[in-house]
Amino acid sequence: MQSSMIPDGSRLRIAIQKSGRLSEPSLQLLERCGLRFARSKDKLFCFGENDPVDLLLVRDDDIPALLVDGICELGIAGENIAEEQRLSRIRRGEPAEYQTLKRLDFGGCRLSLAVPEEFDYDGPEDLQGLRVATTYPGLTERYLKDHGVSARIVRLSGSVEIAPSLGTADAIADLVSTGTTLRANHLREVAVMLESRAVLLQASKQLSASQSEVLDRLLSRIDGVLQVKESKYVMLHAPRERLDQIREILPGAEAPTVLPLEGQPDKVAVHAVCRENVFWEHLEELKAEGASAVLVLPVEKMLA
Ligand code: ATP
Ligand code: ZN
């Protein structure tokens, strides 16, 4: 083991997915927070160059164990993985101590039940006594149990969607984002068992004072990054008497700055940070209220 991987009590280690859907967005989020890593894509460990935060590049499924075993303080994984492993660990009587610090804005998908197109499905009770194939036995079992259904869970490690046509299952529970894979396999999504997103997870072990400080700073930067993505800075000229209406239209603007306009007593300049996306429809509504010279600018950084 490299010496840099041994916990030293002052640096934080974050486990992220090495290669897959969550890799790029996880790394991008951390880089937007100002972290820089000596990138070695083929290696497990990336040293944080300007902050005491290092990366471990691993399979997403390994992240909960790295947290529980104290190898990493933080991890980014899908809620699907975090919740499934929590259930299976509890079931095996193993420790499952990690908590969700923040839901992130990527990795969106759902864990859904799907049945063959010709299956006449009216509700979960139709699965009573049947076989459901999945790589998420814990979450599937919980869903079925919550609906009073007892079905046989067929545990698979992949290619769940072909189980019904192979005759090894009557239904499946699998991750879906667009539904294309389901349709290609003549399956129909009939229920969503879990709406999942990537989350920042934290191990439950106590952090040192310097680690806590680094974490607090990282969390407030993550908040800033998440807010900035949707935020826009809007500038416009408006008739003074339409100010209330204009404020109403600006999406998610708390307290716009209103400035006088030289030589135009009946007009003002309005500057506002809109914390939601600004669409063409908003601009058209503003114009209808008499706004002119409307400018919408991206916000680069924000610190609340
Ligand atoms: P590895 O285990 O090698 O790290 P993987 O095959 O488990 O990779 P990906 O397919 O890259 O992982 O998915 C990683 C995560 O991305 C999933 O656990 C889930 O949280 C999220 N995700 C988002 N959309 C989808 C989707 N359509 N199918 C599967 N996962 C999705
Ligand atoms: Zn995986």
Image: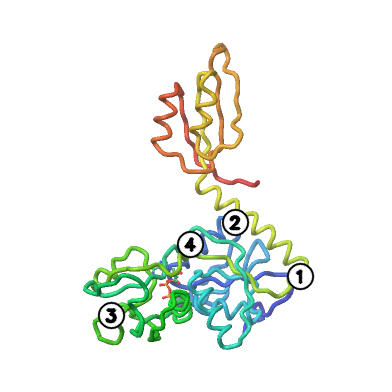
3 or 1: mark nearer the eye: 3
Residue appearing at x 41%, y 83% in the figure: 150
Does 79 sit left or right of 3 as displayed?
A: left
Please tell me which of labels 3 and 2 falls first in the chain: 3
Q: What residue type is labelled 1?
A: Ser
Q: What residue type is labelled 4?
A: Pro
Q: Dividing the image into four equal quarters, which quarter contains ligand 1?
A: bottom left
Q: Is mark 4 on a helix, strand or loop?
A: helix
Q: Does the residue labelled 2 lie within 8 Å of ligand 1?
A: no
Q: What element carries label 1?
A: loop
Residue that mark 4 sits on = 25
Q: Residue 162 carries which label?
A: 3
Q: What residue type is labelled 2?
A: Ile
Distance from disc 3 to disc 2, alpha carbons, whole Å, reads 39 Å
Distance from disc 2 to disc 4, alpha carbons, whole Å, reads 13 Å
Distance from disc 3 to disc 1, alpha carbons, whole Å, reads 48 Å
Residue that mark 1 sits on = 208
Q: Residue furthest right?
A: 209
3 or 4: mark nearer the eye: 3
Relative to the observer, which residue lies in front, 265 or 34? 265
Residue appearing at x 53%, y 37% in the figure: 233
Neighbourhood count class around disc 1 (C-alpha, 10 Å): few under 14, some 14–19, many 20 upward: some
Estimate the x, y position of residue 85 in percent, counting from the top left: 53, 79
Total labels: the figure holds 4
Q: Residue 272 carries which label?
A: none
Residue appearing at x 60%, y 67% in the figure: 100
Residue that mark 2 sits on = 222
Does 50 sit left or right of 154 as displayed?
A: right
Distance from disc 2 to disc 1, alpha carbons, whole Å, reads 21 Å
Mark 3 in CB contact with mark 4 (< 8 angstroms): no
In this rendering, the answer to whether 1 lies above or below 114 is below
